[in-house]
Amino acid sequence: MRFCDATSILMNTIKTVCVYCGSGPGTNPHFVEAAVALGKALAQNNVGLVYGGGSVGLMGAVATSALDHGGKVTGIIPDFLTSREHALSRVQEMIVTRDMHERKRLMFERSDAFVALPGGVGTLEELVEQLTWQQLGRHSKPILLANIDGFWEPLLALLTHMRATAFIRPTLAVNILKADRVEDILPKLRVTAASAPDDSKQMPPDVAHRL
């Protein structure tokens, strides 16, 4: 998979990407195909993968693909999910946390950007939390929806509805990226990351600790 030369100068801007996704494969085979393609793209572009640590579903597909293509993978999983989601033993780094709060904090701290592949309630919760922190000005790391076969269109419609009904105020932007194709994900993340001031990409340590 090749990316346009215009973004090659930004290669070092994004060093790690956190991927949120389902612990199941879903009903559409394109979802697994996209997870495999994303894992391969991250590895081939020397971008580390940070993810939920499981070996099943889309989580397993993206991580296994990254590893199979020589990529660096960090899994972060709470202790109570190690058996249920079958923690992937092949990863270079597996961090077992006490709870979900610690998991999400470490995923934030170790990532330069966030991508949401298709998934369920857990994926949505992780995604929305990052959007909330960004909206409140706690970080400016890029957040992208991998809108495979239009999976995230209902969420995008809901965000539009929230803005139209004034629950998302004009002064609180929701800066969410969208890519319908896997090959567009990294270029969009890089361009967005390059335009954000360095000191605005990190959440203050005291705030991260409380969250």
Image (spheres, rainbow, N blue to C red):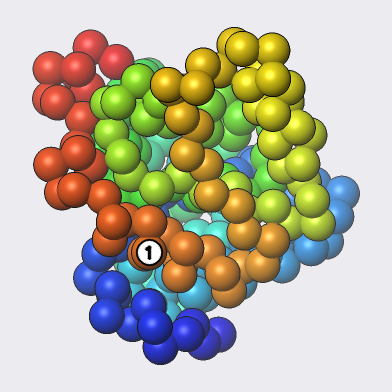
Instruction: State left or right for residue 46 relative to residue 203.
Output: right
Instruction: State left or right for residue 191 relative to residue 122.
Output: left
Q: Position of residue 40 (x, y in %)?
A: 51, 75
Q: Residue furthest right?
A: 27
**Residue occupying image coordinates x 49% and y 74%:** 41
Q: Position of residue 89 (x, y in %)?
A: 42, 54
With respect to residue 118, does 104 lie above or below? above
Q: What amino acid is labelled 1 in the image?
A: Val
Q: Secondary structure at mark 1?
A: helix
In terms of depth relative to the viewer, which is nearer, 118 or 82?
118
**Residue occupying image coordinates x 83% and y 61%:** 29
Instruction: State left or right for residue 109 relative to residue 71.
Output: left
- Residue 165: tell me if it is visible: yes
Instruction: State left or right for residue 4 relative to residue 10.
Output: right
In terms of depth relative to the viewer, which is nearer, 60 or 12?
12
Q: Quadrant of the N terminus?
A: bottom right
- Residue 65: tell me if it is visible: no
Instruction: Identify the residue position indicated by label 1 in the image.
Output: 191
**Residue occupying image coordinates x 51% and y 16%:** 169
In terms of depth relative to the viewer, which is nearer, 60 or 10?
10
Q: Name the image quarter holding residue 7.
A: bottom left
Q: Quadrant of the C terminus?
A: top left
Q: Position of residue 188 (x, y in %)?
A: 47, 63
With respect to residue 178, does 24 lie above or below? above
Q: Name the image quarter holding residue 65.
A: bottom right
Neighbour tally class for label 1: few under 14, some 14-19, many 20 plus, Cα within 10 Å:
some
With respect to residue 135, does 56 lie above or below? below
Q: Residue furthest front?
A: 170
